[in-house]
Structures are given as C-alpha cells and as structure tokens.
Amino acid sequence: MTRRPRLMRVAFPLAFLLSATGATAARGQVLYSDDFNTDTSANYTITQTLTSANGPTSDATFAYNYGVAPGSGGLSIPLAPHTTDGSTLGLRLRVDNLANSNGGTAPNGINYVVGAITVATKNVPSLPTAYTVRADVWGNYIGGTSLASSGSNGTTGAGMGLGTAGTGLQYPITNDGFLADAIHDGGTPTYRAYVHTVNEPPSSGYYPAGTAAGSNNASNSYFSLAFPSQQAPAGQQSFSSTQTGSTPTGIIGFAWHSFMLTQDGTNITWYIDNTVVAVVPDSSTDFGATRFGGSQVSLDAIDTGLTGNTAANNQLFNADIWDNLVVTAGVPEPGSFGLFGLAAGGLLVRRWKRPAK
C-alpha cells in the first residue's frame, strides 16, 4: 500500500487555528461542512441562467468522481489537498454546457449578460461576527489547439460567495452579498471581487496587486509569481490534443487551490492559497443599505459570455470541481495562517495592508 505524503494529512486543522468569536460560537467551531462524497443536493438551492425557452443551460453533479479517466467521464484529477479519506468525489459545476444562456430578457424577467450556475447553502446557521469559508477548487477548461491558447473555448471561472440569502443567483447581475470570482483560463479581468453587482476595479484600492488598470489580471506579476504555469493531467492529455501544452502563468487552471473568504466584522478578505487577492471593507457603499442578504454561502461557476459549450469534449473539460467546503467560526491568526498555507500548497504567506481610501 502506498503511503500518501504527510502534508496531505494536515487536512483539516483549520478549526484548531481559528480564534474565538463570541458567545454564540466556540473557538474553532465548525458551523457547516460538506465533502461532497454523497448526493447532498437537498441541502442547497441550485439556480442558473436559462435559455429563451426557460430551459436549463448548466448542471451541478454531486459525488462526481473527478479522479477517473476522461473515457469514464472523469478528469484524471489528483486528490484534493484537504481530503483525508482518499476519495476523489466532489461537486462538479458546469456552466452553459447544455445550451446557450438567453441573451435577451428570459421568461423569468432577468436580462442575462453572462451565464452562471449557483449552488447556495440552505442550512448555514446565523453566523458570528467573524467566520471563515473555505473550499478546495480545481478549474478545468478545454484548450484550442492546446492549453497555451488560454482556453478560447472555455471563458469560465470559479466563484465563492458569502452573505447571501441563498435563494437565487450569485453573479454579476443579481447578487445580494459578496462574490469572489477567478476566471481560470485567463480572461480579463481575471480576478473579480463583486460587491453586490459592482465588479470592483483596481482603483478601489481593494486589490493588493495594485491600483492601476489591469492590476487584477493574470498577467500582473503578483499573480504570475503566485500561480505558475500548469499542464493538464496525463489522462486528459492522452485523451485529447486540446489538453496538451502548458497554461499561461497567473491563472488557477489545472491545479488544486484553496479558496478562502474571511469575514472579521470589518473586512472580507479573499485568499487563494496564501495569496491575498482582495480585501473589501464591510462599510463599502456599494453594499448599499441592505448590505448582506443573509448568512448563506455559495459555490459558483460563471461564463464570461453566453455561448454554450455543447460539443462533447467541451462538456467534459469545461468544469469547476469543488471539494471540502467548510464554514468555521473565527478567522486564522496571523501567526498560524502559514500552517494553513503549508497544508494547502506551501506558498509564502502574503501580508498586505489595504490602502487608505
């Protein structure tokens, strides 16, 4: 029997690392978790953009076996970093894979601009002032002639949201909380922090990568140093020529990453592994008077366009895989966050102070 590397066993001590948050939540208390090893779809509200005939465009597959070969419907993806039981089961989200999202006014009255699917929790309890949402995510896409073409047939991204009522889409057009979205094939802007429906620009001062236009793109050295070029798993490469070559630097495609949102009662901080992507103050006027719609969290897939990925290989390869979702009381202590990062990937901790507004 092959013994897994020891780092893989540093899987779930996040609760140990978290600070106390008040009388309603004990130190490090896990408030919600799902390893997606079974069909837990009843615990979620699943919403998506629609066709002009009000039909489905996207899908969410629970207990999806991402580890098996493409010929068997999988993606040959290795074990997620926070998995402790050896299972390669997770949640697969695919957007616009069944049909095009409607570009006009859909029967439900929403004028779609991009395609999306949202899987939002139903049962997260009333949250303490400080809490953390974390999950492992793998962004997969189909290349053109190879992955070097930056996924010209993909244009999709992985998103995580908090502060939503959990009853509808969390995406650029309708969003009642905060949404962090990373376009995993290098679309621009690559890294997007949505406050309600406002895609915050670098000039907001919320991105440590810089305030100049384009600072939140994969081409910025802040991201290219954090996220090196990757290759698709061998099983994908042998299955299709579109999966050969290497990705551009600065994107999250074809590697496991840990998305983490921390809410400390003052700011929402978005991390990918140990890299601070954005720090958004709760006091941002873009939240408006309503601020947060509720206490639910969401996992999302977003297509920057509306065109469906209905060809067979497009349907297979254009997918976001989520695993090991956990909501925990408190936020990581500065001195212990490096241990979390070591478990998630071993990168250096990036500390950043949000510029004065």
Image: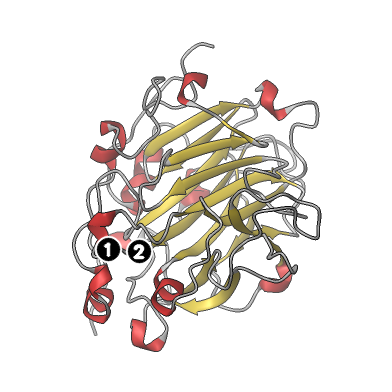
Is 303 drawn above or below residue 265 in the view shown?
Answer: below
- Residue carrying label 2: 9
Residue 269 x %, y %: 52, 34
1 relative position to 77: left or right: left
Choose top left, top right, bottom left or bottom right for residue 127.
top right
Query: CB under 8 Å between callouts 1 and 2?
Result: yes
- Which quarter of the figure is the N terminus placed in? bottom left
| Any part of residue 109 in sight | yes
- Which quarter of the figure is the C terminus placed in? top right
Identify which amino acid the numbered label 2 is placed on. Answer: Arg
- Could you tell me which residue is drawn at 51 percent across and 70 percent down? 92
Residue situated furthest top in the rendering:
356
Is 270 drawn above or below residue 288 in the view shown?
Answer: below
Residue 165 x %, y %: 77, 48
- Could you tell me which residue is drawn at 62 percent across and 68 percent down? 57
Residue 271 x %, y %: 44, 40
| Any part of residue 233 in sight | no
Kindly state the secondary structure of the residue where label 2 is placed.
Answer: helix
- Could you tell me which residue is drawn at 75 percent across and 53 percent down? 105
- Residue carrying label 1: 6
Q: Nearer the viewer, residue 33 or 252?
A: 252
